[in-house]
Image: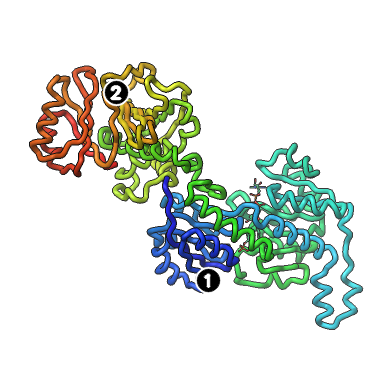
């Protein structure tokens, strides 16, 4: 998937290095951190890239207004301020900078734990209010020998564990995807949540805010914790229910809370933040010069790497693209899309299952991007997804849209390609329609339609059993070549450049000259014409043109063939 970025809008406070790196790489940048929502909606169509931190809410209406948006970058970790589902459906890459602010967030967490244990915030307030006598009531606790429960043992959770162990704390924790052996490597005993709650003196949360973690710590959890348990949230407001913290502090069940993040930011109601037992900071976890430089540089470099086709590091919604960035993969992406278009033209109607088989060593890692490319061609005009908006279908959104309409995709790979090809792609649908193709010299070639191979090529026997139509594609000299549709190979693999005309005719030996004559008399400048071998009285054919063909050639052809479709490639 080729990727060009011309202009990027930055709407949150981000280190200047982000701007410098993007500009040095030829990308225009506008930084405006003062835009209202209405102004953002007006401005966003001018840009193909957007960079934000947590303040800008990249909601569905912003994404939909961004008609040219290709990529949204989060200079930081949490992407909960970005509607990732809508971005994915629009084919927009969303990426964050995982790890760039890990140490700062971990240090902030440790700072809150330490400060809570010794009432630093209350002592400081007392001094500012000239109340020396407060020292009598601000009795603290040592951290030594206490148990810290860490919910979420990812990047930040792990760094918090390592740091708090140096105070002599025992660390225990829970994470659904980090196994006990891994947490044991950083001396943290993995436990189920119900075992954790009664053991913890301190609880700190380091998970994303997702349905499973919203209100993870609530009244019921507080009720089974030790009396006086202290809680810390430097992850996202709402993982510990704010109303429950307030109630637990009032009842004495909770001995204190360190909160950097809030259910609403800024909070609509500061009552909780103002409680003496609460140590509150205004989302400062990542606010260090080091973290801000890191995330600014990282997001800019990640954008540049995507443009250069080097890497998709940090992308959270573009799995199919991961192996599709190299120059060698480009003809295959083109070919996949063309196969999808050909299939849509020749096999209209809804399909429920699609199986893509890649053959040959070069395509070992290509299954996911080739199936996404085929889907992008197949679904571009599909009424099931609102049809006709071809510009928006790409490797990012086509898998998600296929899932949405219940189209299941299966990828398989076989090392040996059918001779004489080195690499081939075949696609078969549940109704049996199949095609095969390959690439050569940058062109997409059709080698077989519906089990009928094009002459001069050996039969791809294994692919043609019990099937009706199948495409196969390969690459040769960097081009996409369609080598077969439905088992019928093309005598000369069909190059799928610009606009190709596919037709299905009878086994009449005069099919090729008849079609050539008809096209010539319709004023078409034919640059290549090839037909497959005959099977069951049918032959498939492909024509390409030196000048764009008109719909008229279709009309002319339909009088002499069984089916014909123009495919724009
Ligand atoms: N306050 C700040 O300024 C600040 C700065 C950086 C990150 N953060 C936030 O911190 C959080 C953690 O960041 P990270 O970089 O460590 O992320 P991470 O992805 O490395 O770790 C998160 C962990 O949470 C785990 N998890 C998911 N669901 C869970 C559940 N139901 N119960 C327990 N664990 C669960 C995941 O498996 C993962 O291991 C994120 O929400 C991020 O947005 C806040
Ligand atoms: O998830 C994050 O990276 C933090 O919450 C930091 O947010 P910020 O970039 O707005 O400081």
Answer with the quarter of the image where residue 297 lies: bottom right
Q: Nearer the viewer, residue 502 or 388?
A: 502
Residue 197 picture location, percent across and down: 76, 49
Left-right relation of 361 to 157? left
Q: CB atoms at circles 1 and 2 under 8 Å apart?
A: no
Residue 558 picture location, percent across and down: 13, 33
Q: Which quadrant holds the N terminus?
A: top left
Judged from this view, the residue extending furthest toward the bottom is: 130
Residue under circle 2? 489
Residue 412 picture location, percent across and down: 46, 27
In the rendered image, is residue 569 in sight? yes
Judged from this view, the residue extending furthest toward the left is: 521
Q: Nearer the viewer, residue 446 or 354?
A: 446
Residue under circle 1? 33
Element on which disc 1 rests:
loop
Q: If the picture is divided into quarters, which one holds ligand 2?
A: bottom right
Mark 1 vs 2, N-terminal side: 1
């Amino acid at each position: 998937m080729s990727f060009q970025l011309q202009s990027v809008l930055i709407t949150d406070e981000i280190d200047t290095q982000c701007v410098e790196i993007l500009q040095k790489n030829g990308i225009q940048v506008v930084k405006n951190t003062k835009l209202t929502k209405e102004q953002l909606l007006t401005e966003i169509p001018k840009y193909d890239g957007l960079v934000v931190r947590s303040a800008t809410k990249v909601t569905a209406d912003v994404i939909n207004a961004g008609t040219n948006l290709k990529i949204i970058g989060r200079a930081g970790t949490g992407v909960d301020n970005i509607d990732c589902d809508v971005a994915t459906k629009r084919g927009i890459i969303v990426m964050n900078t995982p790890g760039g602010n890990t140490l700062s967030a971990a240090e902030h967490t440790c700072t809150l734990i330490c400060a809570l244990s010794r009432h630093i915030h209350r002592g400081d307030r007392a001094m500012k209010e000239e109340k020396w006598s407060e020292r009598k009531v601000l009795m603290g606790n040592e951290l030594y020998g206490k148990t810290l429960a860490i919910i979420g043992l990812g990047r930040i959770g792990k760094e918090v564990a390592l740091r708090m162990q140096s105070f002599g704390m025992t660390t225990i924790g829970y994470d659904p995807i980090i196994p006990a052996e891994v947490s044991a490597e950083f001396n943290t005993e993995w436990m189920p949540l119900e075992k954790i709650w009664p053991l913890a003196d301190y609880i700190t949360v380091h998970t994303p805010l997702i349905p499973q973690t919203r209100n993870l710590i609530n009244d019921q959890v507080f009720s089974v914790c030790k009396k006086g348990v202290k809680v810390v949230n430097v992850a996202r407001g709402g993982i510990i229910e704010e109303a429950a913290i307030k109630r637990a502090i009032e009842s004495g069940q909770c001995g204190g809370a360190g909160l950097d993040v809030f259910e609403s930011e800024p909070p609509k109601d500061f009552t909780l933040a103002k409680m003496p037992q609460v140590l509150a900071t205004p989302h400062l976890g990542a606010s260090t010069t080091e973290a801000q430089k890191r995330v600014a540089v990282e997001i800019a470099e990640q954008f540049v790497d995507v443009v250069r086709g080097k890497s998709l590091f940090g992308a959270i919604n573009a799995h199919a693209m991961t192996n599709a960035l190299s120059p060698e993969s480009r003809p295959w992406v083109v070919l996949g899309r063309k196969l999808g278009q050909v299939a849509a033209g020749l096999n209209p109607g809804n399909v429920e299952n699609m199986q893509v088989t890649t053959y040959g060593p070069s395509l070992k890692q290509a299954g996911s991007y080739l199936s996404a490319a085929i889907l992008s061609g197949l679904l571009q005009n599909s009424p099931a997804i609102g049809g006709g908006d071809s510009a928006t279908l790409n490797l990012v959104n086509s898998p998600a849209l296929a899932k949405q309409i219940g189209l299941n995709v299966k990828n398989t790979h076989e090392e040996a390609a059918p001779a004489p090809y080195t690499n081939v792609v075949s696609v078969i649908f549940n109704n049996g329609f199949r095609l095969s193709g390959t690439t050569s010299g940058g062109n997409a070639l059709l080698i077989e339609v519906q089990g009928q191979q094009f002459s001069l090529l050996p039969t791809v026997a294994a692919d043609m059993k019990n099937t009706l139509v199948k495409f196969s594609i390969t690459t040769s000299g960097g081009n996409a070549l369609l080598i077969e549709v439905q088992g019928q190979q093309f005598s000369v693999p069909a190059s799928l450049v610009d606009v190709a005309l596919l037709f299905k005719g009878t086994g009449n030996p005069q099919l090729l000259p008849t079609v050539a004559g008809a096209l010539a008399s319709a004023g078409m400048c034919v640059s290549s014409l090839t037909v497959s071998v005959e099977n069951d009285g049918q032959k498939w054919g492909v024509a390409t043109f030196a000048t764009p063909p008109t719909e008229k050639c279709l009309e002319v052809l339909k009088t002499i063939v069984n089916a014909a479709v123009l495919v724009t490639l």
